[in-house]
Image (tube, rainbow, N blue to C red):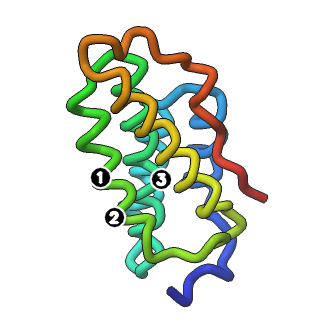
Amino acid sequence: MNDCTVPLPPAARYGLELFNRGEYFEAHEALEEAWRAEAGEIRSLYQGLLQAAVMYLHITRNNYEGAVKMFGRCMKLLAPWPEVCCGVDVGSLKRDLTAVMNIITRLGPERLDQFDISLLKPVRYE
C-alpha cells in the first residue's frame, strides 16, 4: 500500500465532510466519484470508505441485512490499509465500525430501530 502519502482528492475530502455531517447517501456519492476517478490501488480505500457510509445509511434506515452486508464488504477493503493513510485515521474507523457492528448484532433486526445514532462516529482525517 504505497499510495498513503498522497493527499486526498477534493471529491474524497468532500465525501468525508458529508459523512461526518451524517449525510451518508451524499457521502457515498462523493466518495464513489473519487473511487471512479482513481486508477491506483488507493481506490480500494475510497471504496471501503464509501461502503462504510452505506453501512451507516442502512442503519439509519433500519436495514439490518444491508448494514451487515456492507460491514463485511467495507472491512475487507479497509483491512490491508495502515492505521493512517492519506491523512485518514483508518484504524479508528475500523474500530468504530466494529463497535457499531457488535451493537447492531446484539440488537438484531427486530430491534435495530433502538440503535443510538449518536454512536455513528465521524471519520477522523487531516
Would you name the residue on which mark 3 appears?
49
| Image position, residue 68 (x, y; %) | 28, 39
Q: Is residue 50 left or right of residue 124?
A: left
Q: Is residue 109 left or right of residue 24?
A: left
Would you name the residue on which mark 1 appears?
72
Q: Which residue corresponds to the image point at 38% horizontal and 10% vertical from the top-left? A: 113
Query: Of marks 3 and 2, which one's residue comes earlier in the chain?
Result: 3
Crowding near pointer 1: few (<14 within 10 Å), some, many (20+)? some
Would you name the residue on which mark 2 appears?
76
Nearer the camera: disc 3 or disc 2: 2
Q: Which kind of residue does numbered mark 3 sit on?
A: Leu
Q: Which of 126 and 31 is in front in this view?
A: 126
Q: Quadrant of residue 117?
A: top right
Which structural element holds mark 1?
helix
Q: Which kind of residue does numbered mark 1 sit on?
A: Gly
Q: Do the residues labelled 1 and 2 touch (CB within 8 Å)?
A: yes
Crowding near pointer 2: few (<14 within 10 Å), some, many (20+)? few
Q: How far apart are marks 3 and 2 (CA)?
A: 11 Å
